[in-house]
Amino acid sequence: MKQDMYQFTTNALRRAGLMTPLRIVIGVICMSMTPIVWTMQFNPLGPHDLIPRIIQFVLGALPSVVGMFWIFGSWPTYRQSLVFVAWADISMVIVTSMNTATVSRLDGTYHMGLIGVYIAFILGPAVLAIHCAFVLVAIIALSAYSVVVDHAGWGDLYVFLAPALSSLILLPVLIQALIEGARRTAWATVQQVNIDPLTGLSNRRGMYTRADELMQNDSPLILVAAIIDLDRFKKLNDQHGHEHGDLALKEVARVLTTCISEGDVGARLGGDEFAALATAQSGADAGEFVDRLRGGLEEISDTVTASVGIVCRRLPLDGSDDVDSLLRHADRAMYEAKRQGGNRFIRFDFGDVLENSGGATEDTLRRLSTN
């Protein structure tokens, strides 16, 4: 769910054309930390001893490197964003703790508010809660250090602690509450628009939305497209009622959900027609997906049988191919399976993609079951 929300947010930024400007802004903010930190090297309130100076100098240089990655690199994954936040929080505390005065140590933590705002916008409440807890512990630890070493009084520190807690914890939490409310409302709306209510799979619109995300993957993956149409579904409804038909549709949806991996797409296109878009690292992996799909449908063959058309291509697709063309080829293969009596898999124009991939390529046609 957390990664889905992260993907939802980043996709919204991409569609709005804000991803590149935001990357540049974050990169510039990161790079601006370097002169701010290095200036403390010449400030009387900064570090005095050699080791603290070296530590602060080295850690102060890293934001410029990270900022260059933000500006010239690609948008980070969810895990990369978590690493970025953890690095920023820990580095900020270490850098500011190298200063020699109470005021410079506590004031330095104010920059952690920028991290909190990034988390509120991008990563959500769970990560923000961890960040705020870390900030609170860091502020208390730095204050206690000042009390013990600098003999500062807690009353004297209040003038620094109060605004620090307000800007570093309360403000990001308020921003998060507003953003999360809007994000969850938008997420619910998108779910209603893109999700089939009966099966919980994507609908046709949702499938194309997810397909666009798959097409943006520059990795040399294999994209497998499958069209699944239930055999004699109208007869099933007429003889046993629509409730029985709905249960059959849910069973097929369960099979699709079991077969696909995270990031793949299972969809109900309408009526008794389903689709799957799955990525694989190799021809063998693609063949295993086909076998999983076949095996799953075999398990429910007593309830319903299906005609399945499959086609795949290597990513990235060339100019002559797109998702629509793959689905058209898979649809043609599915209708050929129908023409030959149904309850079959037919593979269309795989080329060498599944060469030497095991059982999935042994037969061009293969019955799902003997029933």
Image: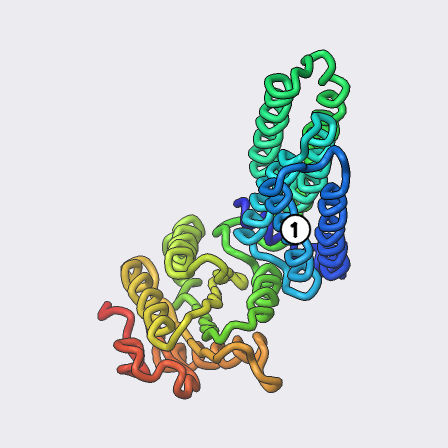
Residue positioned 71% across, 45% down in the render? 37
Residue 99 at x, y = what percent? 67, 34
Q: Nearer the viewer, residue 55 or 224?
A: 55
Name the residue type under label 1: Thr
Quarter of the figure with residue 172: top right
The reply to whether residue 181 is in sight is no
Residue positioned 67% across, 42% down in the render? 115
The reply to whether residue 362 is in sight is yes
Residue 163 at x, y = what percent? 76, 24
Residue positioned 45% across, 78% down in the render? 312
The residue identified by callout 1 is: 9
**Left or right position of 119 against 24:** left
Q: Nearer the viewer, residue 267 or 187?
A: 187
Above or below, 2 relative to 69 = above
**Left or right position of 244 against 300:** right
- The secondary element bearing badge 1 is classed as helix
Above or below, 320 relative to 369 = below
**Left or right position of 244 against 21:** left
Above or below, 23 relative to 134 = below
Residue 54 at x, y = what percent? 61, 46
* Count of picture labels: 1
Residue positioned 74% across, 33% down in the render? 45
Q: Nearer the viewer, residue 77 or 7?
A: 77
**Left or right position of 190 against 45:** left
